Image (tube, rainbow, N blue to C red):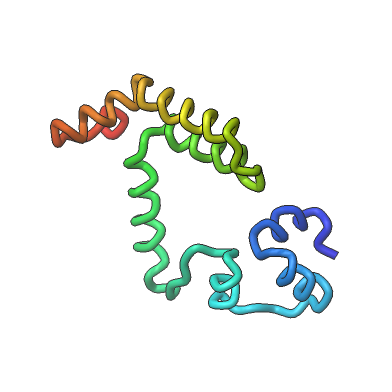
Amino acid sequence: MPATISPYVVRAMGVQASRRYFVSAERFSAQQAFAMGMVHEVCTAEKLDAVVAQHVSQLMANGPQAVRLCKQLVRDVANVPNTNTLRDETAKRIADIRASAEGKEGLQSFLNKRPPNWLV
């Protein structure tokens, strides 16, 4: 029984697939994991380093505070009804990040066609 990891796996693969694979204990391929939403991408072993480097490069280009706040945003809005309160909260969050030092630096670096200060 995958009890310890079950909350994470059920969220990732969904209830139906979890029922099947928890009970059957059958193995599934990388392609099946991709189809269930457990992984974002599948590649050959030969391409793995290049694919990882591309993803790391993309993540590193983003502002560290923005990355942290985006992770929190997903946790906060997942499975929450789309109410006026939620819309107000998300509008406040985008205004706050845009007004932050990092947000201003990101916009200025874009407008001035230069790397942001977190990359130099």
Q: Relative to the observer, which residue lies in front, 93 or 49?
A: 93
- Percent across and percent down for residue 95 are 41, 25
In the image, residue 46 lies at what x, y percent?
39, 73
Q: Residue at (21%, 31%) from the top-left corner? A: 109
Q: Up-down: is 86 above or below 7?
A: above
What residue is at 75 percent from the left and 55 percent from the top? 5
Quarter-of-image position of residue 26: bottom right
User: In the drawing, does residue 84 fall left or right of residue 92?
Assistant: right
Quarter the C terminus occupies: top left
| 77 relative position to 96: left or right | right
- Residue at the far left in the pictured view: 112
Task: Name which residue lies at 48% across and 26% down.
Answer: 92
Looking at this view, is 111 or 40 the one in front? 111
Count of labels shown? 0
Across and down, in percent, residue 114 comes to 16, 34
x and y, in percent, of residue 118 in the image: 31, 30
Query: In the picture, which quadrant includes the N terminus?
Result: bottom right
Q: Quadrant of residue 83?
A: top right
Q: Is residue 60 above or below residue 92?
A: below
For image coordinates 46% across by 66% down, the residue present is 41
Tell me which corner region of the image, top left, top right, bottom left or bottom right, holds residue 119: top left
- In the displayed structure image, the side of residue 94 where residue 6 appears, left or right: right
Residue 19, compared with residue 66, is above or below; it is below
